[in-house]
Amino acid sequence: MNLLTQPAPASALIDGEAKRCVDFADRGLQYGDGIFSTLPLVAGFPLLLGRHLDRLQRDAGRLKIPFPDRSNLLQEALRLASFNPEGVLKILLTRGVGGRGYRLPQRGETTRILSVHPRPGYPDETRTRGVRVRWCELRLGINPRLAGIKHLNRLEQVLARAEWDDERILEGLMRDEEGFLVEGVMSNVFLVQGGRLLTPLIDRCGVAGVMRALVMELARQAGLAVEETRILPRQAWEAEELFLTNSVNGIWPVCGLEEKPFEPGAITRMLSRRLEALIGSELETRCEG
Amino acid sequence: MNLLTQPAPASALIDGEAKRCVDFADRGLQYGDGIFSTLPLVAGFPLLLGRHLDRLQRDAGRLKIPFPDRSNLLQEALRLASFNPEGVLKILLTRGVGGRGYRLPQRGETTRILSVHPRPGYPDETRTRGVRVRWCELRLGINPRLAGIKHLNRLEQVLARAEWDDERILEGLMRDEEGFLVEGVMSNVFLVQGGRLLTPLIDRCGVAGVMRALVMELARQAGLAVEETRILPRQAWEAEELFLTNSVNGIWPVCGLEEKPFEPGAITRMLSRRLEALIGSELETRCEG
């Protein structure tokens, strides 16, 4: 094998090619006209890839972005994972180049951008002891047409994340315009109250995360009552347990909300164990297959 | 002059270079983390460029995007205009590459994308007889932190513009979540009622256009009472005159709102004349200078 003629292992594929260049006229850049999903790579395996592709397909449908050939996306994800066995895979789809102004292009060609990034260096104890969180000032605007979708219009998150610099605080909780709790800047949020699991309804704003859906499934399998509902900040303060979910970090117990301490509780620990078991069995099946 | 070695006249400059390529990791693409402004090129002259640069600088300040050297932007705009004397210039600024997740990069380098596009082929009578408009179903979410800014989070406009295909309808009017009139998909909106000029307050959502500000100035200079206020759809139906503004098309009288006909009225015509005079004198000064 001649190393000199072998291309460097790609960390990004754009429409299947190893490159970093996107046309400036792409609607993803011009209007944030696109969607994304982010997942961990473990030992060369993209965790829960099927669920992430399902979510991308559902979000694309809601925005009427033509969904690319699913087996292409799968192949490209596996190709990147083989070059970069540990990391974070981001799959980003845009409506592509074209269209005069905001109007949809007549024959759009969806742009596929798959890229690998280092895993964020959070210490292990974020999953066991938990993380400290704060309230964000910025309120999420209400728009049911965009609610749930992991789209590229993320200025609210950028401004919310710019509200604090304290390295010890890993997440901020966000409320909507009416003051209801919605989510974290980069995570979904769950409360345990009276033995029930509560999570904000994502019908007016917020992102309906893949990990959020999975944790609700695991909780129901464990016989827990799970409710998606409007949640007031007061309920977060008074929760018996409080935890965050996202696809890269899994479940993060909250050990402090502003100055109030929380203990990682029994239900949070049970769900973390079930999640680890599910991931373990997914990795094992893949090794056998 | 050797034509073979001369580069093609650039229609886009990215960070000062004639190219089309943007790094996929640019935050403009990843998060819609940027702003833009659009203006006409007339006989090689970028109309109202100073006002557009002022607006970009103000919007950048609100999003804490480092504003690039203003004389660079000016030079680049003039350079593109010299290659492309007639068209539309779009100046787009992003927070550049970098930053882990939503967090702001420590030392960001703002990306500058200047590009020239053909003028939209609207017939002249759009400015004299007027345009037909409709109501959009999609409601604008309320977020005072983003209100007024011409940022890259434009999915609401993309979805609103996708609501109709009828080529005879050139614009859609948008309401906010509470039902108040805010703007057109690509324009601001003005009403004449009892001899006063009314336009929606842009303090909770919407874009505060350069042409909107200019038309308010011209109206005040003409002795008109101008009010920025909350406006109900009913007031648009009942207005004596109704018109739209944007930087590329100037003033568009509305000649029909859904099925209701409107006449381009005396105040709309007066403001159009004053706008033409101002633009004429700007072009003349520039030719003398």
Image (tube, coloured by chain):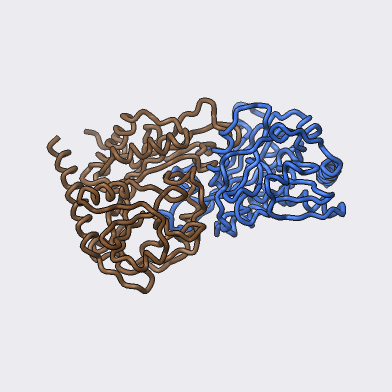
Chain colours: A brown, B blue
For residue A234, above or below residue B112 = below
Q: How many marks?
A: 0
For residue B12, above or below residue A203 = above
Quadrant the N terminus of chain A occupies = top left
User: In x, y percent, where is residue B62?
Assistant: 58, 59
User: In x, y percent, where is residue B94?
Assistant: 53, 50
Left or right: A5, with A144 as reference point: left
- Which image quadrant is residue B154 in? top right
User: In x, y percent, where is residue B239?
Assistant: 77, 44
- Which image quadrant is residue A122 in? bottom left
Foreground: B259 or B249?
Answer: B259
User: In x, y percent, where is residue A188?
Assistant: 36, 54
Foreground: B59 or B204?
Answer: B204
Left or right: B280, with B46 as reference point: right
Foreground: B86 or B34?
Answer: B34
Quadrant the C terminus of chain A occupies = top left
Residue at the image position 33 percent from the left and 42 percent from the top:
A11
For residue B118, above or below residue A274 = above
Q: From where the camera sits, is residue B119 visible?
A: no
